[in-house]
Image (cartoon, rainbow, N blue to C red):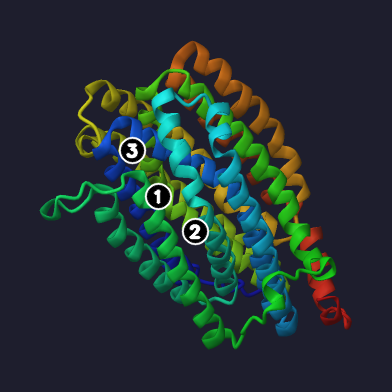
Amino acid sequence: MARPQRPRITPIAGPILGEFLIGISVTMAALWMASQISDAAAGAFGMSQQVLESLFVLFRVLALGVGVTIAQAVGGRRAEAARRTALVGLGACTWAGTAAALWLLFLGEWTLEALNAPTEVAALGAQYLPLLAVAALLEAYNLVMAAILRAHLHVRDTLYVMLVMHATHLALAFPLMLGIGIAGWDGLGLQGNAVALTLSRAVGLALHLWLWRRRMNLVPGQRDWWVCPMRALGPVLRVGIPGASLDIAYRIAFMMAIAAAAKHGVAAVATQAYVLQTLRYVLLISLAIGWACEIMVGHLVGAGKFRTAHLLVRKGLRNGIAASGALALLAAATAPWYLRAFTHDPAVIQAAQTLLWISFALETGRVANLVVLGALRSTGDVIFPVSAAIASIVLVLGFGSLWLGAHFGLVGIWIAYAADEWIRGALMFWRWETHGWVTHARGIYQRLRSPGVESRF
């Protein structure tokens, strides 16, 4: 029997890697600018980013559900179903983005207090978070519209959008945050980053709308911006809601860990912010591989090529572990040099390097959660990953970080991070290798080939 042809994920993973690299680099640059103001400003920026990422779970639910559903429809040659799902996702964005914006406007200060933010950090963050409300709504549109373009394999287009959007953010953030020396203006501090972020996301939305019309011949009408009928949203929610449950559980547990670190003062909050931002670079390659595998597995499931999907994920997992492990070691070994760009406090640098050494275990364990979990989601196997992972998230990451953090500080919290990632990664790998996902994939394949499938969208 001829060996099945393996689709290449590099043409998809490459542009996605570029997107992540640009986005993370701009956020790192903003963190550097905040660190030039003070460690407290850097801590406020870091904690605010965690609040934003927790709210962005709403957007990721839509992006994941819409992306997987469209990838399956495109793989099954159901163009009208893909079109309707895209418009439904756009309407849902408005409601999700509005909810996040209202939270930032009215509950931002309360959130920082709940996270045990030190007084100096909380004061800065309480002024900063409400200014991000409009940017949060725009970010909802950008994340979901980009996911829809990727599901149609227009990954280079999304890379170009992110390049322009983040370049705009960076070009505006520097003078708005730190001022213009020759003009004698000291800038707006963190508030300047909020202005830059909002304007850049508006540019991103305009570019996405242009690409939707050019690449997919899709022009949203007025009703499409706010109408999202539940019948059409059903396939998206079947993928997104279980993913949301997992993401919400993770974010709650992770915020418990953030709160545990905040009890140790401003230096601990700043150290955590520097390390977490550094680790974004470490997981770049495996994150890109994971997204590429998720898209390709969705197409392969829609086409009924299950064995090819299995081999693709194995290869992606192997490459991801090698890349993340090597980058984690490099980040830890070189920490004393690059961290000086953010802080000159030797205690902070030493503490950060210790956490980065532990992060070798954390990142190699995280790969399976990036690669295999996304693949399982694309096959329609969404219940097992959630139910299997939540116990580890709550007990190991959440309560484990509180207990270990109380006894061993940041080191204990990082041990809890690593243990949780390895436990969940092992569970995801076991599910994939035992083919527990195949029944779900067959159900999707058969549904896409039923005569009435178009009418359900």
**The image quarter in which residue 303 lies:** bottom right
Residue at the front extreme of this rendering: 184
Question: Could you tell me which secondary element the residue under label 2 belongs to?
Answer: helix
- Tag 3: amino acid: Leu
Q: Badge 1 is on which residue?
A: 323
Q: Earlier in the sequence, mark 1 or mark 2?
A: 2
State the CA–CA distance, disc 1 to disc 3. 10 Å
Asked whether the beta carbons under mark 1 and mark 2 sit within 8 Å of each other, the answer is yes
Q: Badge 2 is on which residue?
A: 289
How many dots with numbers? 3
Residue at the top extreme of this rendering: 407
In-front residue for pair 206/175 = 175
Query: Residue 326 location in percent, x, y?
Result: 35, 44
In-front residue for pair 53/292 = 53
Q: Identify which residue is drawn at 57% across, 65% down.
A: 141
Q: Identify which residue is drawn at 36% across, 41% down.
A: 278
Q: Identify which residue is drawn at 55% across, 71% down.
A: 150
State the CA–CA distance, disc 1 to disc 2. 10 Å
Query: Residue 83 location in percent, x, y?
Result: 69, 80
Location of residue 404 with respect to 232 vertically, above or below = above
- From this viewpoint, is residue 396 visible? yes
Left/right placement of residue 154 relative to residue 384 reads: left
Q: Badge 3 is on which residue?
A: 329
Location of residue 441 with respect to 405 vertically, above or below = below
- Tag 1: amino acid: Ala
